[in-house]
Image (spheres, helix red, strand yellow):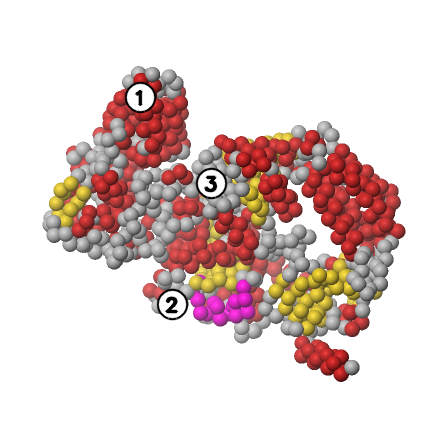
């Protein structure tokens, strides 16, 4: 019993000091002296150290010791002796419960931090000389010496220096003074001075172990040690990497730890487990007070907040850009691509300033939320003290003066479409435009979108045209036009649907060509790479689905009524496409019976899909809400004539009403729920019960399913018991019938997730790409597979320690099979990138040029076709609009006017008599000059036609063309966007309409 108590006490002691031991133990050497561990366990630990990191191997060593039952006699003494014999004497003092006193411990920690801070300079030491001197003074073991000398031989002087610094700090207090003496003996006077603020022999004595004291108690200023020097040499840091890349990158300077701290250690600022002491009032921010503890006060200081320190792999990928070359940086999600871009931006502006040339940087993003994210967490945060930084997006009022914003700031972060609009203005001769020559660097985020006629590609085509014009001008010995440097950022360029490696290589080369990239840069993350464990959870098909059977019965009854014969299974995407085509054809043919039936069939098909992925109750609620809204359309406002219901509409309403009670009862029976949801429940519960601090994301296909899954989690008591706090995050676009999230709402949810107020995000694909989301330790894709790019980005969200990536898929759904295809494409993409990187530079540039010329020619063909297809010089009166639902004639094109080249409105008195106005509280939109807070609908059938907009005090009914049947040249058309119409409509004359409104108001008052 006494032995058991001793064992328990010793184990508790090891656990208590685990954060220290993780950084002080070198497992490879210690294992050689541990005889109570069998060889299998030793091999597992060595493999962990070799393939992952020493930190993780130490964790496994400690866990293995703790799990051994019964523990052999003398195990604890043997463990302590093994630590000492393996060169980990400092770790042994902790295990023996004889740590240094708190003051000495804090001083030692600060010495470690000082070494970390000045590592870029220290890597310039003559490693072999210093190594032998340190070995002679017993702060390196013979094994340490051999490894350091081997590193020097294999990886050069800096590699050896990095290994030396990593090893000396593991020795007990006293090593720092000895290391200083070794620097002095090997004639490293500058390094000695950087560490102490004094020259060798200047009133400095080694008095206490590990502490360098100043005899004259005078503070030494070491401003130089936190200025540009460390930044310039940052790529040579001996720091492996922190475990959670995004969280480490959020600090103003990446703290140079000797090895990766675990998430449990993230609250500690220094190498070990002590906290960073605040500076005393009145102490200069970048000064070093030797009067209290010698050099160690410097270690408590961090470099200025605008200092950016890159890791080795980040510096490697940045290097060509620092030389002014165009590159694509391809690094995994969470590996600090944006931080590299900030560093390149700073160096670019610094160099141009030194040369006396103007610098102007524009950072382009493809999503509005990314504008604020890149601004506040990256570019403004690090560069605000030296450069003017601003952001502009579609949600920002600053977009109206974008040219001024660019002129007055050094760095502008904006959505790509805004820049393209102003480049087009300049091209059209508008003085308010922007030219490429006004910019010196363009950073393109998620640059794999620079293809297929996207907005990134439009901007780059302008660039490529000017580049090739410059080549011609140069031959003619004429002045060329300046073009900016290009920096592309991506986690995955994809393969563009390629099935063969040759096509994948061509896809990569096309993106390189579109971005005029000198090279595509990929980094070797080494120990920094975080790959989650991947699993596929397959759910069996339901044996019985009475809820779905009732819905299918309703759909078949509608088929009979409308004389429709579907050619595919109900509840599938193919059926969705079939029924949409039927609805469009019926609208053209003015066949209201088929058109209305097709609309209802589409809703039932959606309910079948929802029943397969989320709760039956959610599918029922969706249908119930739809029919409730449809019935409201048929109820006229007060003092209006009743809206007519057709026989088909009565049939459809009755059909649902008759089945409603049965559907409602079936939706409450848990035994018929889909098995995918059961698999998801099991997975979530497993993650939150097997982890101390679980944090995860579930990706799902639609906004509706994201909201429903969040409600399901919130309403389930079992999830609450294990601490699940869920919230959904969806996109901000207005194309969906589900109300979108605003950028502010998205930020609020993501902030709560960052602060652990929420620990489970349920998201649509909006969260896969770009958005800065706190590191997760599990990611689930629920019945969702898109392409290899989305798979890589979703998986990249799981970058915390020991994270998992799970695909939950129904049997026979094809989801798991498509995931396998994506995995194959990912491997193909990696091979294709490697092949591109290995191309001879001349061959690479030749192929790039061919693709660029091809892209320019294709753009010319598209432009020509667009002009031919462009606005016809026809009278707008030739275009007729009728209600899509009841075919009532509504107006002609001459009645429709355009506001701000965006909004098509009809303010004629005749049109006002044709619609009713309803309030829509869920869609209230207010911008600078107008607001919308209601919709307009057909007086006869209730079909929505658009929204009521208040534009600078005038009520303007705004038409949504998709709600009308358009007739032109006696041909009926289904048009989804006004741009498809091809007829120039007149501009809205505000002054004229304002005068008319004023006159009518006066007439009413005089009556």
**Label 2: few (<14), some (14–19) or many (≥20) C-alpha neighbours in 10 Å:** few
**Residue at x 42%, y 46% (from the top left corner):** 247
Q: Position of residue 361 (x, y in %)?
A: 45, 62
**Which label sits on residue 164?**
none
Q: Position of residue 671 (x, y in %)?
A: 69, 30
**Residue 624 appears anywhere in the view:** yes
Q: Which residue is mark 3?
A: 799
- Above or below residue 977? Residue 214 is above
Q: CA distance from mark 2 to mark 3?
A: 41 Å
- Above or below residue 844? Residue 689 is above
Q: Quadrant of residue 383?
A: bottom left
Q: Earlier in the sequence, mark 1 or mark 3?
A: 1
Q: Is 410 part of what is drawn in magenta?
A: yes
The magenta region covers: 396-411
Majority SS type along the magenta span: helix
In the image: residue 972, left or right of residue 388: right
**Label 1: few (<14), some (14–19) or many (≥20) C-alpha neighbours in 10 Å:** few
Q: Nearer the viewer, residue 43 or 374?
A: 374
In the image: residue 82, left or right of residue 801: left
Q: CA distance from mark 1 to mark 3?
A: 39 Å
Q: Secondary structure at mark 1?
A: helix
Q: Which residue is mark 2?
A: 357
Q: Which residue is mark 1?
A: 6
In the image: residue 632, left or right of residue 198: right
Q: CA distance from mark 2 to mark 1?
A: 72 Å
Mark 2 vs mark 3, foreground winner is: 3
């Amino acid at each position: 019993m006494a032995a058991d108590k001793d064992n328990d006490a010793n184990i508790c002691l090891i656990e208590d000091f685990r954060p220290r031991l993780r950084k002080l133990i070198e497992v490879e050497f210690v294992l050689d002296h541990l005889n109570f561990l069998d060889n299998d366990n030793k091999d597992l630990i060595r493999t962990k150290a070799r393939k992952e990191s020493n930190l993780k191997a130490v964790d496994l060593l400690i866990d293995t010791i703790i799990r051994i039952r019964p523990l052999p006699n003398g195990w604890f003494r043997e463990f302590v002796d093994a630590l000492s014999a393996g060169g980990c004497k400092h770790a042994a003092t902790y295990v023996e419960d004889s740590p240094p006193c708190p003051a000495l411990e804090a001083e030692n920690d600060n010495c470690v931090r000082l070494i970390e801070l000045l590592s870029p300079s220290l890597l310039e030491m003559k490693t072999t000389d210093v190594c032998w001197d340190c070995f002679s003074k017993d702060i390196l073991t013979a094994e340490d010496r051999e490894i350091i000398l081997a590193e020097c031989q294999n990886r050069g002087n800096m590699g050896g220096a990095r290994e030396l610094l990593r090893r000396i700090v593991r020795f007990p207090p006293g090593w720092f003074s000895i290391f200083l003496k070794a620097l002095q003996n090997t004639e490293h006077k500058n390094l000695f001075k950087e560490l102490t603020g004094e020259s060798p022999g200047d009133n400095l004595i080694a008095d206490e172990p590990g502490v360098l004291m100043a005899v004259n108690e005078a503070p030494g200023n070491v401003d130089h040690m936190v200025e540009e020097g460390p930044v310039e040499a940052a790529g040579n840091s001996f720091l492996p990497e922190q475990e959670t890349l995004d969280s480490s990158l959020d600090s103003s300077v990446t703290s140079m730890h000797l090895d990766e701290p675990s998430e449990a250690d993230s609250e500690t600022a220094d190498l070990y487990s002590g906290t960073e002491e605040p500076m005393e009032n009145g102490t200069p921010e970048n000064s070093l007070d030797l009067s209290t503890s010698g050099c160690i006060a410097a270690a408590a200081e961090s470099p200025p907040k605008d200092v950016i320190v890159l890791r080795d792999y980040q510096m490697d990928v940045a290097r060509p850009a620092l030389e002014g070359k165009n590159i694509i940086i391809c690094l995994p999600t969470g590996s600090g691509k944006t931080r590299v871009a900030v560093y390149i931006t700073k160096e670019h502006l610094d160099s141009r300033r030194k040369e006396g040339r103007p610098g102007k940087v524009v950072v382009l993003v493809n999503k509005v939320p990314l504008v604020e994210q890149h601004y506040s967490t990256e570019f403004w945060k690090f560069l605000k003290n030296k450069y003017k930084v601003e952001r502009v997006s579609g949600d920002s009022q600053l977009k109206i003066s974008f040219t001024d914003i660019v002129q007055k700031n050094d760095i502008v972060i904006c959505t790509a479409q805004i820049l393209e609009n102003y480049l087009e203005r300049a091209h059209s001769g508008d003085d308010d435009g922007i030219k490429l020559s006004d910019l010196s660097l363009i950073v393109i985020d998620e640059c794999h979108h620079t293809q297929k006629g996207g907005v990134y590609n439009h901007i780059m085509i302008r660039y490529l045209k000017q580049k090739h014009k410059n080549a011609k001008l140069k031959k003619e010995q004429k002045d060329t036009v300046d073009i900016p440097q290009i920096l592309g950022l991506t986690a995955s360029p994809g393969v563009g649907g390629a099935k063969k490696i040759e096509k994948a290589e061509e896809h990569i080369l096309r993106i390189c060509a579109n971005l005029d990239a000198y090279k595509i840069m990929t980094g070797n993350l080494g120990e920094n790479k975080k790959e989650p464990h991947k699993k596929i959870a397959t759910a069996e098909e339901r044996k019985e689905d009475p809820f779905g059977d009732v819905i299918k019965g309703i759909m078949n009854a509608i088929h009979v009524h409308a004389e429709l014969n579907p050619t595919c299974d109900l509840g599938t995407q193919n059926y969705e496409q079939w029924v949409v085509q039927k609805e469009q054809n019926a609208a053209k043919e003015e066949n209201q019976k088929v058109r209305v039936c097709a609309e209802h069939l589409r809703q039932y098909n959606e309910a079948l899909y929802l029943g397969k992925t989320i709760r039956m109750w959610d599918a029922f609620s969706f249908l119930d809400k739809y029919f409730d809204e449809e019935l409201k359309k048929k109820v006229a406002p007060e003092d209006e004539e009743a809206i007519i219901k057709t026989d088909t509409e009565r049939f459809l309403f009755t059909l649902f009403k008759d089945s409603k009670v049965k559907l409602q009862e079936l939706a409450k029976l848990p035994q018929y729920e889909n098995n995918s949801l059961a698999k998801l429940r099991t997975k979530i519960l497993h993650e939150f019960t097997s982890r101390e601090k679980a944090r995860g994301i579930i990706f799902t296909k639609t906004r509706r399913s994201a909201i429903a899954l969040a409600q399901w989690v919130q309403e389930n008591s079992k999830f609450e018991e294990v601490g699940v706090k869920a919230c959904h995050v969806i996109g901000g676009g207005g194309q969906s019938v589900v109300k979108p999230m605003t950028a502010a709402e998205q930020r609020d949810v993501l902030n709560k997730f960052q602060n652990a107020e929420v620990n489970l995000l349920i998201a649509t694909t909006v969260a896969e790409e770009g958005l800065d989301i706190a590191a997760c330790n599990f990611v689930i894709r629920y019945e969702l597979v898109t392409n290899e790019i989305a798979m890589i980005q979703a998986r990249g969200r799981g970058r915390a320690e020991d994270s998992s990536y799970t695909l939950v898929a129904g049997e026979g759904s094809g989801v798991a099979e498509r995931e396998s295809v994506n995995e194959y494409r990912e491997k193909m993409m990696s091979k294709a990138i490697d092949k591109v990187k290995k191309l001879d530079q001349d061959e690479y540039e030749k192929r790039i040029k061919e693709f660029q010329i091809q892209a320019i020619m294709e753009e010319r063909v598209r432009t020509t076709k667009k002009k031919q297809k462009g606005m016809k010089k026809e009278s707008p009166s030739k275009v007729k609009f009728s209600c899509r639902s009841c075919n009532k004639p509504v107006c002609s094109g001459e009645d429709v006017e355009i506001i701000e080249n965006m909004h098509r409105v009809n303010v004629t008195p005749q049109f006002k008599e044709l619609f009713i106005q309803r309030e829509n509280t869920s869609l209230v939109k207010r911008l600078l000059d107008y607001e919308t807070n209601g919709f307009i609908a057909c007086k006869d059938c209730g079909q929505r036609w658009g929204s009521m907009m208040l534009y600078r005090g005038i009520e303007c009914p705004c038409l949504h063309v998709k709600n009308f049947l358009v007739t032109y040249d006696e041909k009926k058309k289904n048009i989804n966007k006004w741009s498809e119409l091809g007829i120039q409509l007149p501009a809205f004359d505000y002054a004229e309409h304002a005068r008319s409104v004023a006159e009518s108001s006066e007439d009413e008052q005089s009556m």
